Amino acid sequence: MDIHDYYNHQYFLFLFLFLFLLLLVYLFRLADRRGKKPCEPTNWPVLGMLPAIILNLHRAHDYLTQILNDCGGTYLFKGPSLCNIDMLFTSDPANIHHVLSRNFSNYPKGPEFRIIFDILGDGIFSADFELWEIHRKTTLALLTHAGFNARLESTVWGKVETGLFPVLDHFCGGMGLDLDLQDVFQRFTFDNICKLVLDHDPCSLRVDMPYLPCEKAFSDVAEPLLHRHVTPRGVWKLLRLLNVGSERKLLKCSRAFTEFIYPHLNSGGGGASMLRAFERVYREEEMGSTDGLRDFLKDTSLNLMFAGRDTTSTCLTWLFWLIAQNPVSERKILEEIEDEFGKKCFTTQDSQKLVYLHGALCESLRLFPPVALEHKAPVSPDVLPSGHYLPRNGKLIISFYSVGRMESVWGQDCLEFKPERWITRKGGVRHEASYKFPAFNAGPRTCLGKEMAFVQMKMVAAAIIYHYHVELVEGHPVVPRDSIILQAKHGLKVTLSKRNS
């Protein structure tokens, strides 16, 4: 055999093996697809369903919703072999009620949650058992204190007058300037929650829109945390060790939080500061050393700031995107504000009169819940109402985003923006079960700041809708980010014009 014949032989051998491999892949996929829905991912040998997840990571929430809608509301994603990232996803209200309420004690946050969300430390979001009880009781006592509502009202309306209106007036000065309304809402809520928690106003909401590393870190931190859910732990821990990729971004965010919060831990205004209450509890309960107090207060502050900034700013962003496309709803909100208050500031109690606005906010929260996913792991093996088995420490992901888009839960018009679905025949607010509307979580871990969030959102939304007409910038893409916090990926670019002087 000469050299030419040898290479021909090798070429045909390689071609045969390549075609044989393609045939095996095709036959395997054909066998795996038998009995499956079109949207279901293929479960490949060794790789599991990871290829489909990676290909659809840019539209993770909608991809998951499509699968859950077609597969009865619960679906097991198989990860690569030996990587231990199999995850059971659900948007079934019966499962949600079972996990978050009826069998609550079996579903703490767990060690896996604390590893993934290590940036939260010992705050209320990652705490379990006694520590969670301490956080909850202390926070509830602060939010129900007689003077809290008055402090909240003065803080919000003060920021509307000194921060929000000057910025909006600047951008509706007739020059046709585009404004990222999401950035405005994030700065507004960041300033407010810093004032309430740290007794410090960083004044990030100004006409010059200053860059504050801590304020921007809240937006940057969400996407890497989602990636940790689908990345083997050993891989993202290696990335963190090498300080590269998404882990580099997380470390940068962590430094920004630390550098901003620590200097303000001891500068609060006496008994009025939330932190002083947590400091008293820390000492009375003998929770740790004096050195540990600063870390405890930092973690507590960071968790409260996450809760106060992201829920409100995210909901407001999607509210204005939705009503900009539904002018009839915008008109009804405006008429309600004019009939009840005009341009007057209103109190926490008076905000309950804005029923249609409340319905519009609920629709925004239903379609775009600020926290898109909830991670759970049972202490003991469990069988969900849907019949799915969960082993001890098995990964369960509840998709709050998908719940609001399930035809089986909300009907065929589930993708429509209809504030009227939240209004009773008598004109009051219709209340839905939290496992059907889990925007503020459900069960014992229901968000303590729910009412505070609604009050702040009504104040901000009413102030803007009464004084300004908001139009979307044509051609600007508005889609959810693929992250734990459901912000608009490219912001919300709008133009403004004055409505009422």
Image: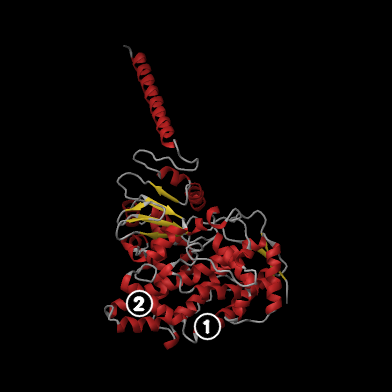
At label 1, which amino acid type do we have? Asn
At label 2, which amino acid type do we have? Ile
**Mark 2: few, some, or many residues within 10 Å (few <14, many ≥20)?**
some
Is 477 located above or below residue 369 in the figure? above
Q: Quadrant of the N terminus?
A: top left
Is 328 located above or below residue 158 in the figure? above
Can residue 27 be spotted in the picture?
yes
Query: Which residue, as the protein is rendered here, is positioned at the far top?
Result: 1
Residue 208: horizontal and vertical position, in percent?
A: 59, 71
Q: Name the residue under label 2.
A: 134
Is 190 located above or below residue 13 in the figure? below
Colouring chosen for the image of the structure:
secondary structure
Residue 91: horizontal and vertical position, in percent?
A: 47, 56
Earlier residue among tags 1 and 2: 2
Q: What element carries label 1?
A: helix
In terms of image quadrants, where is residue 480? bottom right
In terms of image quadrants, where is residue 491? bottom right
Q: Mark 1 points at which residue?
A: 149
